[in-house]
């Protein structure tokens, strides 16, 4: 008996149950917390030392590293990245994983928006927006 697929995709199930956004947010937060923890280990940084670099409390850093707490501000994330000598790169992607149609990419360019632009924070804490242009 050869059935290619049984049931629906997990994303479809979570969406039907109204849980997709919450589960996605928690998963994303877990990845971010893990990446920060790994970088702290690589740099031999304690929570206290990183909190001091971020000019925040250790309690605030604990919230950032708590993978069950999906709340996170971009300011806190940028501060942690900067304190670790890293930048944050975010982008919006189509929900189904498909590429944007060329017409939408041209419309974004006409509106002065670069679809490949990214915001980051330099190690000195300066906010910057960079873009990658293709030749």
Image (cartoon, rainbow, N blue to C red):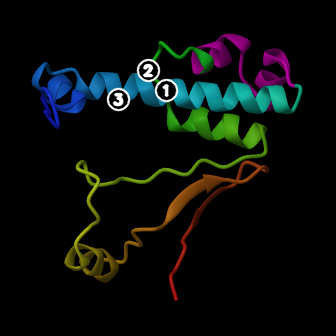
Local crowd size for mark 3, using a 10 Å CA cut-off: few (<14), some (14–19), many (≥20): some
Residue wearing tag 3: 24
Left or right: where 134 falls relative to 53: left
Q: CA distance from mark 1 to mark 3?
A: 9 Å
Considering the numbered disc 1 on the image, is that residue within a helix, a strand or a loop? helix
Q: Residue at x 37, y 72 (%)?
A: 113
Q: Residue at x 66, y 10 (%)?
A: 59
49 drawn magenta = yes
Residue wearing tag 1: 29
Left or right: where 11 falls relative to 76: left
Dominant SS in magenta = helix
Magenta residues (range): 45-64
82 drawn magenta = no
Local crowd size for mark 2, using a 10 Å CA cut-off: few (<14), some (14–19), many (≥20): some
Which of 34/6 is in front?
6
Left or right: where 57 falls relative to 33: right
Residue wearing tag 2: 70
Are dots 2 and 1 in contact, CB under 8 Å?
Answer: yes
What is the residue that sits farthest to the front in this orientation? Answer: 1
Considering the numbered disc 3 on the image, is that residue within a helix, a strand or a loop? helix
Residue 132 sits in which quadrant?
Answer: bottom right
Q: CA distance from mark 3 to mark 2?
A: 9 Å
Q: Residue at x 62, y 26 (%)?
A: 34
Left or right: where 126 falls relative to 29: right
Which of 8/74 is in front?
8
């Amino acid at each position: 008996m050869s059935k290619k697929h049984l049931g629906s995709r997990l994303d479809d199930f979570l969406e039907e149950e109204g849980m997709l956004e919450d589960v996605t947010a928690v998963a994303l937060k877990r990845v971010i917390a893990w990446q920060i923890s790994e970088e702290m280990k690589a740099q031999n940084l304690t929570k206290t030392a990183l909190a001091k670099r971020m000019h925040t409390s250790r309690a605030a850093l604990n919230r950032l590293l708590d993978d069950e707490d999906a709340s996170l501000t971009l300011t806190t994330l940028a501060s942690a990245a900067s304190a670790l000598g890293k930048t944050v790169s975010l982008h919006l992607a189509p929900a189904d994983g498909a590429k944007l149609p060329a017409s939408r990419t041209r419309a974004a360019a006409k509106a002065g928006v670069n679809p490949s632009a990214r915001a980051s924070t330099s190690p000195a804490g300066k906010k910057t927006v960079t873009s990658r242009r293709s030749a």
